[in-house]
Amino acid sequence: MSKGESTGNDAVPEPHGRPSMARWARRVRRAHNEAGLYLLRGAATAVGGAIVAYGGVWLHAR
């Protein structure tokens, strides 16, 4: 059997293999960007909460 002949055991490539990988890459990139935004919002909320709490304690102590 020559190298050009198929044995029938080869996997059949998906017709849309590359676009699906590009679609997954876009989804992963979007999830990564959204996770960054949620982390930034969470940090800002924590800092804002700490400032408000400190202000409340400071006003109560005066």
Image: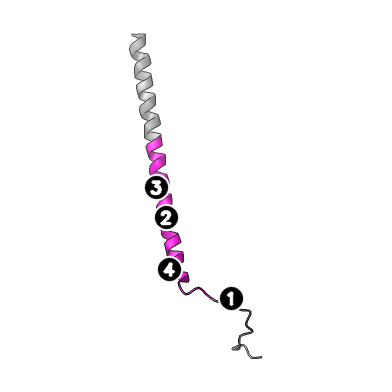
Sooner in the amino-acid sequence: mark 2 or mark 1: 1
- Secondary structure, mark 3, is helix
- Secondary structure, mark 1, is loop
Query: As drawn, is 12 to the left or to the right of 45?
Result: right
User: Where does residue 14 sit, x and y in percent of width and height?
Assistant: 50, 73
Which quarter of the figure has residue 22? bottom left
Q: Is residue 51 magenta?
A: no
Q: Which residue is mark 4?
A: 19
Write the start and end of the magenta stretch as one range: 13-42
Q: Is residue 58 above or below residue 40?
A: above
In space, the residues marked 2 and 3 are separated at their CA atoms by: 9 Å
Q: Amino acid at mark 4?
A: Pro
Q: Which residue is mark 1?
A: 11
- Determine whether label 4 and label 2 are within 8 Å by CB: no
Q: Which residue is mark 3?
A: 34
Which residue occupies 35% across, 28% down?
48
Q: Amino acid at mark 2?
A: Arg
Looking at the rendered image, the disc whose residue lies closer to the viewer, 4 or 2, is: 4
Instruction: Count residues near mark 4 (Cα–Cα under 10 Å), then give few for <14, some for 14-19, many for 20+.
Output: few
Which residue occupies 36% across, 9% down?
61
Residue 29, label in figure: 2
- Secondary structure, mark 4, is helix
Q: Is residue 56 above or below residue 46?
A: above
